[in-house]
Amino acid sequence: MVRVSRVLEGSVAEELGIVPGTELLTVNGRELADFLDWEFLSADEELVIEAKLPSAEEIVYEIERPEGEALGVELEPPTVRRCANRCEFCFIEGLPKGLRKNLYVRDDDYRLSFAYGNFATLSNLKERDFQRILEYRLSPLYISVHATPWEARKVLLNNPRVPNIVEQLTRLAEGGIQFHGQMVIVPGLNDGAVLEQSLADLWNLGEAVLSVALVPVGLTQFSHLYTGKPMSRENARAILDATERWATRALAERGQRWVFGSDELYLLAGEPLPQAEFYGDFDQVENGVGAVSLLRRRVDQGLDGLPRLDGKRIGVVTGLSMGALMPPLLEKLAGKTGATFELIPTMNSMFGPTTTCAGLLVGADIRRALAERNDLDFALIPAETMNDNRIFLDDDSFAAVAAALPIPVYASYDFIDVLSPEGVAVQEAA
Ligand code: SF4
């Protein structure tokens, strides 16, 4: 069902009398199953839309609109397709009990892959879905490949009915669909020969595969399904070696690196992180590929615009893994602003000490780290720790955390966003 959640002021939809709660039934005679149908079928300039108003009145709108003018409706969020797998390494299996219900939803939805860049395994793809992907040209997609050898993939996804991904990807490639792939590497299951075969299979799909990210398995103290080995330094190094071999070939033959290790893989291997140029367009930065290098680049680009903040003492809360990477960045910021920055690496109380990335810190961690820090003028916390409603994973809100702390606290993606003359910290201090 496709239902309107909001009608924009002054829009075509408002003029027509469409109101929130209106069900959109058909466009030009084709039934609407979800937001994708609406998105693609309503792109024409001449439209006949059948709808049902909240009063239950059915109505037909005949519309001729100027090219490019949006109809001006927002839709209720779609019902998310659930995942049919039970991966041992599933992050959701590694969540503690008692969090918000929606955090436990295992989505595996090709529509969200296209619309928002969520990774999907394609395990639950039906024939009709393939036809829609091809008809609407849903490209690029973001696909969790994990392994291409069928048996290895069944084991990794813990799903004996998982389809043959090589056949699926070949069909998509032949239909002109491109995708970014990811492989979560589990030592003993999809490193070594399985990794090699998987990269070869993906390479053979040609330009359909835009990039591949290799991400080490991430476990928390709650990952109760996991029976595999943890990622050792040697494993991480071997995976980076394979990455480098394929990237060298890709650079020579296709002019781009094509396959990338995530930042965590470099940290686990004890290898230095590459420069920002290495990552091209940062296609997989959301997957932790090049995130640190992008942060360094943003700081470098924003440094010149920073104001003097002499005498200020600024706390920087981060995860344990960033503890070693931050000092050079903070030195640059201190040199430019005259402020003193204090790094506050903080242990994750919810997922345990093995979870070291900054983005998974929770409200309780921020409270603990800053509770007695009235010696600071203000503190920065990683903005990635919160959702769009500024709620942490432990359901604590930014507003509640900030109110409980003795100093002002600001959520920052890259320091510059808060410390620049337009940034909130500087504005408030002025
Ligand atoms: S595909 Fe695997 S990792 Fe992803 S949600 Fe499903 S079970 Fe979890």
Image (spheres, helix red, strand yellow):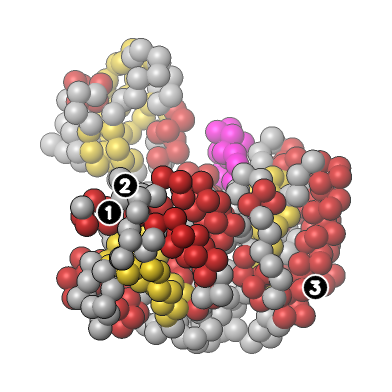
The magenta region covers 128-143
Secondary structure under the numbered disc 1 in the rendered image: helix
Secondary structure under the numbered disc 3 in the rendered image: helix
Residue marked by disc 2:
421
- To which quarter of the image does residue 212 belong? bottom right
Which mark is first along the chain, 1 or 2? 2
Closer to viewer: mark 1 or mark 3:
1
Residue 137 sits inside the magenta stretch:
yes
Figure disc tally = 3
Q: In the shown orientation, is residue 189 left or right of residue 33?
A: right
| Residue type, label 3 | Ala
Marks 1 and 3 sit apart, C-alpha to C-alpha, by 46 Å
Residue marked by disc 1:
426
Q: In the shown orientation, is residue 302 left or right of residue 47?
A: right
Q: How many neighbours does mark 1 have within 10 angstroms: few (below 14), some (14-19), or many (20 or more)?
A: some
| Residue type, label 2 | Pro
User: Does 128 appear above or below 154?
Assistant: above
Q: In the shown orientation, is residue 166 left or right of residue 293?
A: right
Residue marked by disc 3:
238
In the image, the residue with mark 1 has its CB under 8 Å from the nearest atom of ligand 1: no
Tell me whether circle 2 and circle 1 mark residues in contact (CB < 8 Å).
yes
